[in-house]
Amino acid sequence: MTSTISARWRQVREGPEGRLTEHFFRAMFDFGFLSEIGADSFTRVVVGSVGGLIALGLVLTRGYMIKYAVLWRLGSPERYRLALTGDDMLIIGLPMLLVAFITLLVSHSLFPDERDFRILGPMPVPRMVVFRAKLAAVFLFTGLFTTAAHVSLMPLMLLISINPWGEHTVVSRVVAWVISGAAASAFAVLAITAIVGVLVLVLSRSGLHTLSGMMRSGVLAGLVVCLPLVSHLPALGRSLSDGAAWMMFVPPAWFLGLQRVLQGSADPILVRLALIGLGVFLIVTFFIAAIYAVLFRQFERLMLRPASMSAPWFRVPRFVTLPGATPAYRGVHAFTVITLVRSQLHQGVLVGVSAIGMGFLISLLGARFRNMPLFAPFVLMYLCGLGARASLVLPMEYRANWIFQMTEDQATRRDQLRAVDRVVTRFVVGLPVLVACPVLWWTRRADALIVTVVLALVGLVFVHAVLHEWRRIPFTCSYLPGKRFIGHSVIFGFFLGLLFTVFGGVLAGGAASGTAPAIIIIVILSTLAFVLRRQRLALWRDSPLMFEDEFPDQLQQLELQR
Amino acid sequence: MLETRGLSKRYGAFLALDRVTFQVRRGEILGYLGPNGSGKSTTVNLIVGLIDPSAGSIWLDGVRMDDDPIAYKRRIGYVPEEPHLYTHLTAIEYLMLVGRLRGFNEQTLGEKVPALLKLLLLWESRYATMAAFSKGMRQRVLLAAALMHNPDVLVLDEPFSGLDVTAGLLFRTLLRLFAAGDRMVLFSTHRFDMVEKLCSRVVILSHGRVVAEREIEPFQEQATSLENVFVEVTGQEDFTPVAREILDLMQA
């Protein structure tokens, strides 16, 4: 019997379906923008991060030990139940978020695509096998991370399940959590797959590339912004117990309902949540089955549809370029904006890093410090600056930059780089000011305007730091990562951000304290921004463009003792 | 006249180009012939100013390139061997970018770019990004970009690779007419047949050195050549009017 199963398994594994599944699974580690060596090293990082997850779970458990020791000492089963409800939501929500991230990263590989069609089509492999293998690879890949997330949270689950009041047996809780948690993570995978699937079916080939990139960035931003919300889940136990209606819109709450129903609860709120969860899960599953079925039947037609014959939906609007701008300015400006809209990599970096800032902003606003609205926009500004620089520095079709080299002209170089300055200023100053305006108006009323002005002026000074020694046309210069030790960069970046936020917040607070300090601060910042901008323009007029990235002149020596 | 004088390029210990001297006269298409690795692309990169020579100099109409490289580059049009383009842009967006970098105003671009795309048979694909283009289509975009600013010198590095017969015929007609307008074409290739069909003179390169330079007898197109048969049976038009229109558009 065992040998028959083993032989059958070997047959499947070594057959076309097994080989294809393995191929698709491996391809999920290739995001399309990494070189072969980069993809290999990324695979190692991904596998290493599973270990990191387990370590993180242990750290979380260590922190929760203190919380639950206190709850035990209080001797109140009611408070324990409330805490447990919130924490159960957290350990369902965390894997959901992680698996959603991972699925989003591999969203280009969720369905058989044109490459599969062209390469596998002429081979003697039935289409059904290709589709089954793709599904199996998606299942394996997301399953790997779902399992890793649940294994890493298992110690925490065990810890919070043990209680002196004999609420439920540990085993029944763990079993219910594994089932509901797996369903929650599967729902996260299915939801993202459904969005991608709709785009695959309805968009033209050219539209698919642009819009799926934008979808990826948008969902990425949403997930990053959700991070602080997930960290607030433990505090929602009371809202759930009170039957707050808005809990119906919190996906982890649905699956908490499922977990509790599996444990035997008949609480109508929890039953309703469980039913919503199951209903949504089934709808999304049927939806994806339908997408797969349509794709399977219409594979040729969908893969061979012509590139769009209609005008691209995105054009650089005329109002975003300065009236009377020179051709050189218009050229670089349009090139930068179009690349940021169409390139998934550049857009992902820009949106991803900035979304961390947005997440910080939201979580800081929730903090109970009166002056937090003063500091929070500076965090967003700092991360927008980091995102902008990181995105513009990454090359795009590096070997195509000869056209910029051939047309470099001292007379127009400053205009070309002024276009970069404009894009960066809009993003680094405009976006945070736009987001902070309503928040400041809501929280500070009287001095909102003055704080907004200070925020904008600090932003104009910060643009100089973002464009420090910048002599590149965006995306055209080679890029040498690893010029600094990564740990050094992270620590340096963190403290710089902290300094910037504190400094900006103190200036804003100072300006809000009275008319005289406000005038002094505004005059100083305006002068500084003006002088720094003149310096930038002078550098751009006198220095040639940079097309080859350089290592720093002074290499750091370790000065080891002999 | 475009002239190289003792042009050398060294990469570390490797001498890629060794004292190369030749001229491209006005009104001529100079074939620059050599096997792979002989230094053709290095010469082309030096002439278009993408790399600096280790020794020697380049002169255009008696003015040394180094004296005013910007003015020199304004007079050069270049079609590289590999169609290195920003493929996330559409053909219109790319030509607009090149036009703006060359200093054209919006009105001129609005007239030139669509007209060039129509003449080069790219109008139907104007909304598709160039990622979906064949190599031949990309070469046509590069040719349009190279001609847009009405250059005096056209430098072509294997421009016929990947072109279909129709586009190849258009290219050849265009180059002949371009050179006939008292301008210069440097045509780098390893294909003898193209040199024989197009060029009036050839410089042969081997191991980074010029090993021969000679005039070419005017090539007589055989009435029964396979290409002529193809043109006849597929009803291809005479490309001279189209090529003339492109050249007129360049000068507009």
Image (cartoon, grey):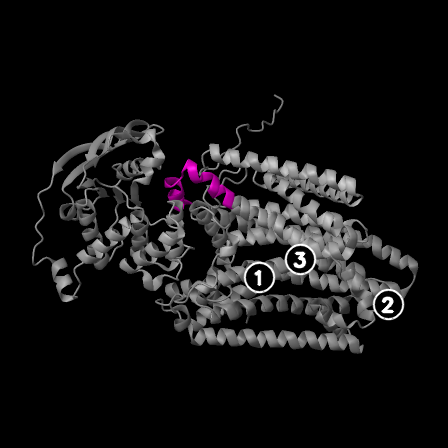
The magenta segment: A398-419
At label 3, counting other C-alpha atoms closer than 10 Å, the crowd grade (few under 14, some 14-19, many 20 or more) is: many
Separation of residues labelled 2 and 1 (CA atoms): 38 Å
- Between B192 and A190, the residue placed more toward the observer is B192
For residue A503, side relative to residue B10 (left or right): right
Residue type, numbered disc 3: Val
Label 2 secondary element: loop
Question: To which residue does mark 1 refer?
Answer: A103
Give the number of the disc on residue A225.
Answer: 3
For residue A470, side relative to residue B11 (left or right): right
Residue B126 part of the magenta segment: no
The spot of residue A354 in percent (x, y) is 62, 51
The spot of residue A298 in percent (x, y) is 42, 75
Separation of residues labelled 3 and 2 (CA atoms): 37 Å
The spot of residue B108 in percent (x, y) is 35, 52
Question: To which residue does mark 2 refer?
Answer: A166
Residue type, numbered disc 2: Gly
Label 3 secondary element: helix
At label 1, counting other C-alpha atoms closer than 10 Å, the crowd grade (few under 14, some 14-19, many 20 or more) is: many
Quick check: A24 above or below A471? below
